[in-house]
């Protein structure tokens, strides 16, 4: 494989990855805890878009609120990880690697 072809493939891959990253920035996942008592809306780049805590959760105390926020975050992060794997996998699928 000549250098020009390799460079063209690298540039094409970089463009696909950049497009995938832009796509992820506009995609959202929701992490939910305790049946919707706490909901975290996160982008595919792990940016927090919104945090919703039902009013009745606040009366449970700070430790309970923190636990539910953590659980909702973990749920959102897992979903974002899966989304990232899917989107980035599609962007890099079929890219030949140099031997």
Image (cartoon, helix red, strand yellow):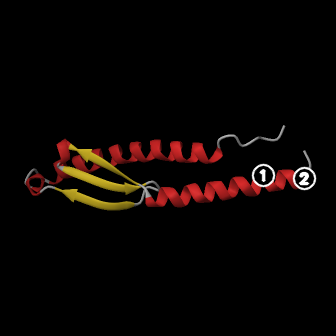
Give x and y (percent) for residue 21. 55, 57
Q: Where does residue 62 sit, x and y in percent of width and height? A: 16, 54
Q: Is residue 88 or residue 48 the one in the foreground?
A: 88
Residue at far right of view: 2
Q: Which element carries disc 2, helix, strand or loop? A: helix
Sooner in the amino-acid sequence: mark 2 or mark 1: 2
Q: What residue lies at 22% left-to-right and 47% top-to-bottom? A: 68
Reading the image, the residue beneath label 1 is: 9
Residue at disc 1, secondary structure: helix
Residue 96, by quadrant, is top right
Q: Residues within 10 Å of mark 2 (few under 14, many from 20)?
A: few
Q: Residues within 10 Å of mark 1 (few under 14, many from 20)?
A: some
Q: Position of residue 64 (x, y in %)?
A: 17, 48
Between residues 52 and 17, which one lies in front from this camera angle? Answer: 17
Q: Quadrant of the N terminus?
A: top right
Q: How many numbered circles are shown?
A: 2
Q: Disc 2 versus disc 1: distance between alpha carbons?
A: 10 Å
Question: Is 96 on the left-hand or right-hand side of 20?
Answer: right
Question: In the drawing, does residue 8 fall left or right of residue 66?
Answer: right
Q: Residue at x 88, y 55 (%)?
A: 4
Residue found at x 45% / y 60%: 26
Q: Tell me the residue at 67%/59% (across/down).
A: 15
Q: Quadrant of the C terminus?
A: top right
- Horizontal side, residue 6 vs residue 30: left or right: right
In the rendering, at what x and y percent does residue 87 appear? 53, 47
Q: Quadrant of residue 90?
A: top right
Which mark identifies residue 3? 2
Pointers 2 and 1 in contact (C-beta within 8 Å):
no
């Amino acid at each position: 494989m000549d250098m020009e072809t390799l460079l063209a493939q690298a540039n094409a891959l970089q463009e696909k990855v950049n497009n995938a990253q832009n796509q992820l920035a506009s995609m959202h996942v929701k992490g939910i805890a305790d049946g919707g008592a706490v909901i975290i809306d996160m982008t595919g780049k792990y940016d927090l878009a919104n945090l919703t805590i039902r009013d009745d959760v606040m009366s449970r105390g700070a430790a309970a609120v923190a636990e539910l926020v953590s659980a909702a975050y973990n749920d959102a992060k897992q979903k974002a990880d899966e989304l990232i794997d899917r989107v980035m996998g599609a962007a890099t699928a079929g890219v030949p690697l140099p031997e």
